[in-house]
Image (cartoon, rainbow, N blue to C red):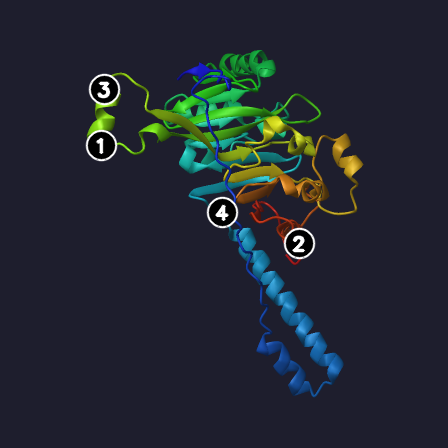
């Protein structure tokens, strides 16, 4: 693995291509169940009884949707699966299996153990608490040591933490620890790199953008035939540009400030943005959200003009919310953006359950 800092002033300038493709949200049609209507007709009820039956039918439909949400383990978008748990103050671990990557480790859900790369955004326990178990479980199953990325300021403490568990448990805990700073780029494999971006929590934090690496033939050679291109290539001339395309971005806990930071632009045009939305309604003020280093849904809506992602995955909802609250919040944001908006709802319950 190679650690490097990309120089934007280099002659072979990395070019980025924004992804903008409006996705139409589906309209929901709630069927009126005949069982409720028949009950009214059999009872000979009047108008108020009929409205009551409609209300019961809608409530039953809401319950059916809520149960389906409970059973849903993740979502698929832009060729990636996104799954995991993210409940504010309890645990956060978001997994993208196609990238063999987990973002934060929460309480180390079993699905995270299969991921070779782990990206830690900050040192709060609900985001890093499962780290020793993650490393130990991979060792137990004779899997290769994982690569764990952390903000540089916590590297020494993470090493001490794992050393304590080695001593207490008298076990080997093998892993590769990478202190990756904002502005640095790490090659995960020959077609994937990762780069942190600055986020704004109550302690030092950072998000991550994973890029695909592609080669594109330079313009001056596009008119040539295959044999001519091959000849030039064999002469040692560089005929392609390296292009980084932002695929998946993960913020972790943060205030909304990153939306306005030009250095975070890649996070806002990745195919998928996984971002926190801890507070969703007027019962909690924006000031309260910012005081605790979090983002309010209304702030995302306010900054929606900067969003160029194809999919937005909202996470880290406060445990005070139900599935119905999250669904309503998703609908509010969906009306503001062309991106597809979804909520990561595993672990949340319906108000009807």
Residue 133 in view of the camera = no
Asked if the residue under mark 3 is in contact with the one under mark 2, i.e. CB atoms within 8 Å, the reply is: no
The residue nearer to you, when weighing 106 against 342, is 342
- Residue underneath mark 3: 234
Mark 1 to mark 3: distance in Å? 12 Å
Indicate the secondary structure of the residue bearing disc 4.
strand
- Residue underneath mark 2: 328
Label 4 Cα crowd, 10 Å radius (few <14 / some 14-19 / many 20+): some
Mark 2 to mark 4: distance in Å? 18 Å
Q: Quick check: 235 above or below 17?
A: above
Q: Earlier in the sequence, mark 1 or mark 2?
A: 1
Indicate the secondary structure of the residue bearing disc 1.
helix
Q: Earlier in the sequence, mark 2 or mark 3?
A: 3
- Residue underneath mark 1: 226
Label 1 Cα crowd, 10 Å radius (few <14 / some 14-19 / many 20+): few
Q: Nearer the viewer, mark 2 or mark 3?
A: 3
Mark 2 to mark 3: distance in Å? 59 Å
Indicate the secondary structure of the residue bearing disc 2.
helix
Mark 1 to mark 2: distance in Å? 54 Å
Q: Nearer the viewer, mark 3 or mark 4?
A: 3
Q: Any mark on residue 75, and which?
A: 4
Indicate the secondary structure of the residue bearing disc 3.
helix
Which picture quadrant has residue 192?
top left
Which picture quadrant has residue 252?
top right
Mark 4 to mark 1: distance in Å? 41 Å
Mark 3 to mark 4: distance in Å? 45 Å
Q: Position of residue 135 (x, y in %)?
A: 46, 23
């Amino acid at each position: 693995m190679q650690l490097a800092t990309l120089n934007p002033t280099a002659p072979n300038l990395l070019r980025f291509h924004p992804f903008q493709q409006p996705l139409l949200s589906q309209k929901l049609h709630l069927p009126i169940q005949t069982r409720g209507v028949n009950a009214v007709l059999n009872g000979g009820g009047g108008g108020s009884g009929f409205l009551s039956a409609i209300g019961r039918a809608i409530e039953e439909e809401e319950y059916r949707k809520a149960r389906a949400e409970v059973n849903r383990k993740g979502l698929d978008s832009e060729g990636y699966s996104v799954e995991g748990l993210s409940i504010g103050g309890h645990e956060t671990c978001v997994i993208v299996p196609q990238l063999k990557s987990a973002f934060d480790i929460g309480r180390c859900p079993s699905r995270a153990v299969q991921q070779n790369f782990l990206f830690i955004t900050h040192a709060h326990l609900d985001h890093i608490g499962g780290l020793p178990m993650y490393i130990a479980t991979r060792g137990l199953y004779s899997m290769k040591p994982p690569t764990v990325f952390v903000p540089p300021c916590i590297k020494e403490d993470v090493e001490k933490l794992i050393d304590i568990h080695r001593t207490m448990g008298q076990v080997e805990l093998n892993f590769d620890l990478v202190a990756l700073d904002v502005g640095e780029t790490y090659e995960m494999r020959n077609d994937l790199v990762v780069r942190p971006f600055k986020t704004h929590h109550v302690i030092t934090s950072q998000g991550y953008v994973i890029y695909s690496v592609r080669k594109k033939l330079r313009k001056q050679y596009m008119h040539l035939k295959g044999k001519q291109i091959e000849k030039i290539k064999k002469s040692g001339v560089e005929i392609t540009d390296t292009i980084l395309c932002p695929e998946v971005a993960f913020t972790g806990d943060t205030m909304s400030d990153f939306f306005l930071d030009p250095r975070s632009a890649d996070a806002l045009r990745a195919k998928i943005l996984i971002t926190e939305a801890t507070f969703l309604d007027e019962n909690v003020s924006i000031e309260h959200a910012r005081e605790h280093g979090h983002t309010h849904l209304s702030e995302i809506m306010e900054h929606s003009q900067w969003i160029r992602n194809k999919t937005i995955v909202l996470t880290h909802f406060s445990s005070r919310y139900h599935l119905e609250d999250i669904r309503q919040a998703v609908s509010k944001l969906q009306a503001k953006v062309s991106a597809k908006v979804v909520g990561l709802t595993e672990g949340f319950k319906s108000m009807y359950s």
